[in-house]
Amino acid sequence: MPEVTAADSNQAALSEIRHQIDAIDDRFLGLLKERIRLARRIGAIKSRENADKWDPKREREIIGRLLKENNGEFPEPSLRAIIQEIIATCRLSQKEIEVAYLGPEATFSHLAGLKQFGSAAAFRPLETIEDTFIEVERGRVHYGIVPVENSIEGAVTSTLDAFRNHRVKICGELNLAISHNLVNQSGRLSDVKLVVSHAQPLAQCRQWLHRNLPEIPQQNVISTGVAAKMAAQDPTVAAIASSLAVRTYQLQVAAKEIEDYRGNTTRFLLIGQESPKAGGDDKTSLLLALLDKPGALHEALSILARHSINLTRIESRPFKDQPGRYLFFIDLLGHLDDPPVKAACGELRKICALYEWLGSYPRARD
């Protein structure tokens, strides 16, 4: 009888474990197929009732419950990503969702869209942020993803201005951690003769560029995706772009994480035709123009304070055709359907020269 060696025992153990993993994978696939069948049944019911296919409150409850039951055993960031991808795929099985964003491929807006909807959505890259608003307003796409503020550089003014000109509603928000890479064809800094990117990444990497490439000129382009395409076409050009751009345009990383400050985060808004119903943890965004009188801003803010409403952000933008007059973008906690918010907004409408509800939507927690 042949002698059983330690190597034979190990091989047998590995084979048995792999057999168990295969069985788990088979069950997992079966459950996924069952889940998507149930999702399609839900889609059919919603279609008969003409109800919105996307229910952010329900999706947030699913993710929260499963993360709680996981109790940290499976790595939480990976589990969250898996759950979001499964939910997105099942939702899209009901009806494909088209999402517009500032293109081309591999911009940070594209990354934000992938985070929100998963890879199964139909993404449509556009040339400008305003184009995204136009496509949503005209109903040619279901949703748009637009940046609204960065933790270092502040407001994205082109997004704020577009809200004045287009009738869309905010449906959601998400925060995307931003890490900038300097990418080119060779991966060597010595080959760089020009650095290109969107104005915000150039500003967010200003100190690094000054220290490491002080003699190299910089060029502002419409998006990080355009910058990556330029780098892919010219070996002397380096782009400040996302990690997705490296794979999309087959580039090399010449320097990683060149942003001047860690914790760099951009807040994105999801825009569509309608805002979702109250979910219990919401934000509301307003666009206001105040009457031209002393104390007008104080009067508006006092209304919010009197109703115990927490103001999370206020941003002003000038009227393009009325020098000296300003629009105010206000974010506050709560949903328009919440009684305190509804009462406060009713009072604001009466005292403001212009009042517009931009939307109520689930508050981002990540």
Image: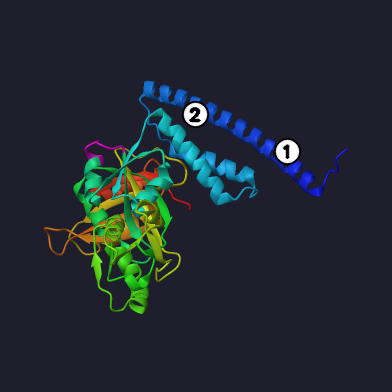
Q: In this view, does 11 lie to the left or right of 77?
A: right
Task: Give the class, few, some or many, for how many residues have Cα within 10 Å of label 1's Cα (few <14, many ≥20).
Answer: few
Amino acid found under the numbered disc labelled 2:
Ile
Residue of label 1: 16
Judging depth in this view, the residue of 26 and 77 nearest the camera is 26
Residue at image position (24%, 67%) is 219
Quadrant including the N terminus:
top right
Q: Residue at x 43, y 47 (%)?
A: 115
**Outermost residue toward the front?**
1
Residue 210 vs residue 215, the one in the foreground: 215
Per the image, the residue denoted by label 2 is 36
Q: Vertical placement of 7 versus 53: above or below?
A: below
Give whichever of 22, 48 is nearer the camera.
Answer: 22
Q: Which of marks 1 and 2 is nearer the N terminus?
A: 1
Which residue occupies 35% across, 73% down? 190
Tell me if mark 2 has few (under 14), some (14-19) or many (20+) residues whose alpha carbon lies within 10 angstroms of its own: some
Q: Up-down: is 51 above or below 281? A: above
SS assignment at label 1: helix
Distance of label 1 from label 2 (alpha carbons): 31 Å
Residue 81 shown in magenta: no
Figure label count: 2
Figure quadrant of residue 124: top left
Residue 238 position within the rendered picture, expressed as x and y whole percent measured from the top left: 31, 65
Q: In this view, does 330 lie to the left or right of 23?
A: left
Q: How is the image coloured?
A: rainbow
Where is residue 102? Give x, y as percent: 28, 50
In the rendered image, residue 111, in percent from the top left (x then y), is placed at 39, 51
Which region is colored magenta? 136-142
Which label was assigned to residue 171?
none
